[in-house]
Image: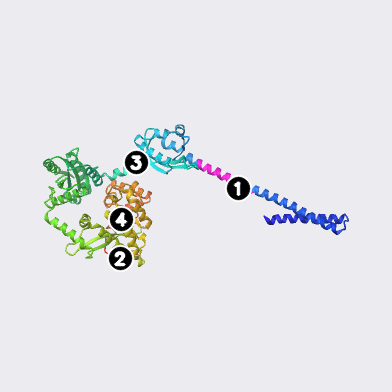
Amino acid sequence: MRLIQNAEILKYSLLLGTVMALYNILTNLHHPYLIIPSTIAAVLIGGYIGAVISKNKQLLADNKARQAEIQGNFDRLNQLQEDLNALFYNHSSWIWSIDVENQMMKVSIGIERMLGYDAKEFEKDYEFWMKKTYPADMEIVNKHYQRLLSGTHSEAQWRIYHENGSIIWIKVMGHPIKNENGKVVRLLGVANDLTKAIEMEKQLQQVSLTDSLTGLSNRLSFNKRVEEWLKAQTAKNNMAILYVNIDRLKVINDMLGFKEGDLVLQIIAKRLQDILRPSDYMARYGGDEFIIALPYTEKANIKAFVQSMMARLTLPFELKNQELDVTVSAGMVLFPEHGTTLNSLMSKAGVALHQAKQRGKNTVRFYELEDEALVKRKLHIELALKRAIDADEFELHYQPKINLSTKEVEGVEALLRWKHPALGFVSPAEFIPIAEESGQMLAIGKWVVQTAVKQAGKWEEEENPIKVAVNISNLQFEDPDFLSHLRCTLEQHKLSPHLLGVELTESMLQNIHTVSPILFELRQMGIHTYVDDFGTGYSSLSILKTLPIDFIKIDKSFIDEITDQSGYSTLVKTIIDMGKSLGFGLVAEGIETERQVDFLLKNGCTLGQGYFFARPMSVQSFEEFYKSKKLLM
């Protein structure tokens, strides 16, 4: 721009100077002292004229550029306004704005599709939306509104009446707008229809709580209901739990087929329903097992009732035009005489059932105090556990997690095993409850983490990085040193955090406010989190989505049934669909057949573990397994 301006000055200076010089010559002005000053004056005047013209041109160019910029901004604002109008008037969500000072509300046309009301009804009556709120949810609405007025972002969900009288679930998110003085003058937000999602979750819950073959409640439903009952009871209330098992159902399945075996289960279920009183509660607890809760007042009466029930259950069956005798065995415990928690009652009912089976089946066994041999074994195990770590009796076995599509090893789960010099291999199902009761689980859990991380670090150092997941007990998770122990262990063995995963049970995640900080810290560290045995606890996917969880593991009990019972197939498919939509990774546990693999792949679950691929194995066996897999790939 400066160069152009100088050129204009030079041009007009030369032009006017030249004209003046020629003029002087042509008019016979021969005195040099007159020619030179007049020419210089002409040059200066020409330069001035050139500067003025140049400045005007620059001003015109700047003005044109500014007008173009203003027009561009105006066009962009128009486009943005059109986009906002399209969003406001066409989005399926309900966008809203409240003028707090003037008590005026503006809503998008999405409200007509969502609730059936004309948007003008909300705009005419400031409190119209509150009048249509479901009465029981008004407290939620008021708290939400007060949070917004206090200047805080708020989210809440509640019910509201549709124009046709039906009830709609909505999720509302709002944000306060403040003026220059910090006063809230406007509220902006959006509301979404949650009705279908909530209905789907209810259906999922119903499927998850019902046995599809018999129509009875299932194990999860029974556990939940009885635990709630137990919490509300005192020592003055009495209840018996009867654990029923069909004798030799496997023989019936082998001889007559699974269809006839299922018919036996349905007949037994129907007979039990006909016998039981309105106050009793029954569920199918497993493949050939039923569980019944029987409130009672007199011990003698409940025992007589159970004996009568057993006699009626063993009446002959007619299957395939032949009469068949089917018997049942049962174990019974009493609350509060034999225990006050569901775990203790079920454990003892299982002992009583086992004793009934050992005594020839077709009988009911009332629980008696553990005999001397059982007590001695339990004490022996408790004392032996205290020396097991120092005696180097524990070891970890590793079960591969397999990519169901490629059959590659994606990682392993580390599982604790104990080989006692005298007792031999002791089942984790036997020694872990004893370790928890005797307060030894925390030390054992730390040993598991230390050993698994050390092994994973060794694999990473050998350039075979393998993801290792360890099971964390409730005591470990609640330990104040849990996170610091993990950090120190990772640093000690130089393991990359992303190669470590922790597996937690659903029951450990019930108190969201307590567990959230720990889970967020694990995520920041790079450690993956798994919810183990999903579906056997009381968590829902909608609750888990608020937590930083990476994977959910579908419990083996569901996988066992997916190819045989449509109810479980639907449940597993729904868990997979909802889990994927919420961003969780999915791992199927307990895969034992190729049909289960095909079902899982077809429905979008690509990671699993189970005996179909490999049992838990020692480090050496796993390394050989892993090498053989790599050679095949």
State the SS at label 3: helix
Spatial CA distance of label 2 from label 1 is: 68 Å
Q: Which disc is residue 623 wearing?
A: 2
- Residue 409 visible in the displayed image: no
In front: label 2 or label 1? 1
Identify the amino acid type marked 4. Pro
Q: Mark 3 and mark 4 in contact (Cβ < 8 Å)? A: no
Q: Mark 4 to mark 3: distance in Å?
A: 39 Å
- Categorize mark 4 by other alpha carbons within 10 Å: few (<14), some (14-19), many (20+): few
Q: Earlier in the sequence, mark 3 or mark 1?
A: 1
Mark 3 to mark 1 CA distance (whole Å): 53 Å
Q: Earlier in the sequence, mark 4 or mark 1?
A: 1
Inter-mark Cα distance, 4 to 1: 61 Å
- Secondary element at tag 2: helix
Question: Which residue is drawn at the image coordinates 36% and 43% (left, top)?
Answer: 197
Please tell me whether mark 1 sits on a helix, a strand or a loop: helix
Residue 55: where, in percent of width, then height? 70, 51
The residue that label 3 is drawn on is: 199
Callout 3 crowding tier (Cα within 10 Å): few <14, some 14–19, many ≥20: few
Check residue 69 in the rendering and tell me which mark sits there, or answer none: 1
Asked if the residue under mark 2 is in contact with the one under mark 4, i.e. CB atoms within 8 Å, the reply is: no
User: Residue 327: image x %, image y %?
Assistant: 14, 47
Q: What's the amino acid at mark 2? A: Glu
Q: Are marks 4 and 1 in contact (CB under 8 Å)?
A: no
- 246, above or below 623, in the image: above
Magenta-drawn stretch, dominant element (helix, strand or loop): helix
Q: Is residue 71 magenta?
A: yes
Residue bounds of the magenta highlight = 65-85
